[in-house]
Amino acid sequence: MGIAIRNISKHFGAFRALDDVSIDIPSGELVALLGPSGCGKTTLLRIIAGLEHADAGSILLDGEDASSQHVRERNVGFVFQHYALFRHMTVFENVAFGLRVKPRKERPSSAEIRKRVYRLLELVQLDWLADRYPSQLSGGQRQRIALARALAVEPRVLLLDEPFGALDAKVRKELRRWLRRLHDEIHVTSVFVTHDQEEALEVADRVVLLNKGQVEQIGSPDEIYDHPNSPFVAGFLGSVNLFHGRVEDGHLHVGEHALPVGEGQGALDEAVGYVRPHEFDLLPATADSGIPAKIERVISVGPVAQIELTREDGELIEVEVYRDALDELGLREGDRVSLRPRAIRVFRKEPLAA
């Protein structure tokens, strides 16, 4: 089932949570609402669910205006960050709850409920815990039970609000992979909220990046990471190094150094170049091209080495290279090198806020 979000605005007193937001989510897609705290992503998710009402705009579910529908009429499954399982009920009873409270005419038989619950528990690979209570489960197991409970009512849309936010890093990574595999199996239209860039880029078909209640960019993970359309997007999605200068003749001029940015880039008197840590080549200090820098610190943990350098003007630069490549170069702390960016995303320098 597709979701059409049309010109949604929402205020809480003087605070503008959402400002004329429009998004189309095709049927069967897994979409991440990504952005910093206070950008409006959870508010938008709750408006889709019917838990909040917009001041303006509409929500269409499969082409039908659902804006005035009660949350029960929308038939959405909602998974919260903190599980919200009933502590006095077993795993089986928690998953069965939504089916048992349906109106009598819509309620499945006891045998059908039992069959459906065990099918879902098998789907989330926890059928062996049916008789346990939530207090006897790990955090990751509780979240998978919460997801099974949301799916039990066969929702038209699955909504997840920071579903892995309360879990440690290792469990989060495992559940991210598991959610992606589950979605590929059931294909229910799903929207999940996260502030974790890695989580959004790893799991979603498309990412909606929100900032200050507005949509900054919508696209596949590759599109928004490789082709950010604003300084905010470039800076929010992973670490970046900034180079301030001017653009002229296809080069970003930083002091006396000229870095190629491509012929398609127009001239700019005040520009900022964004370069990710893994997008540098480290060259000998005598290299003609690049920016001179001194290695201050090398952090070698795992397969990638993180290198902190300082430019001639004192600006700090972060570079990432594979440890094998660093060993081949034979570079150590205190060595001088030349930095050559392989890719630079250039934007006009934004004026400082008043």
Image (spheres, helix red, strand yellow):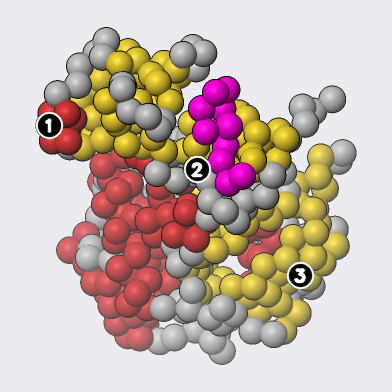
- Residue 144: % across, % down: 33, 58
List the residue tagged with mark 1: 328
Q: Earlier in the sequence, mark 1 or mark 2?
A: 2
Three-letter amino acid code of the residue under disc 2: Pro
Query: Residues under labels 1 and 2: Cα distance?
Result: 27 Å
Identify the secondary structure beneath mark 2.
strand
Image side of residue 267 versus residue 333, left or right: right
| Magenta stretch: helix, strand or loop mostly | strand
Name the quadrant containing residue 165.
Answer: top left
- Magenta stretch bounds: 249-258
Q: Is residue 200 visible?
A: yes
List the residue tagged with mark 3: 6
Query: Residues under labels 2 and 3: Cα distance?
Result: 41 Å
Mark 3 crowdedness (10 Å alpha carbons): few <14, some 14-19, many ≥20: some
Closer to the observer: label 1 or label 2?
Answer: 2
Location of residue 284 with respect to 189 vertically, above or below: above
The disc label shown at residue 161, or none: none
- Residue 11: % across, % down: 82, 48
Three-letter amino acid code of the residue under disc 3: Arg
List the residue tagged with mark 2: 260
Image side of residue 102 versus residue 354, left or right: left
Mark 2 crowdedness (10 Å alpha carbons): few <14, some 14-19, many ≥20: many
Closer to the observer: label 3 or label 1?
Answer: 1
Tell me, yes or no, whether the highlighted magenta stretch contains residue 163: no
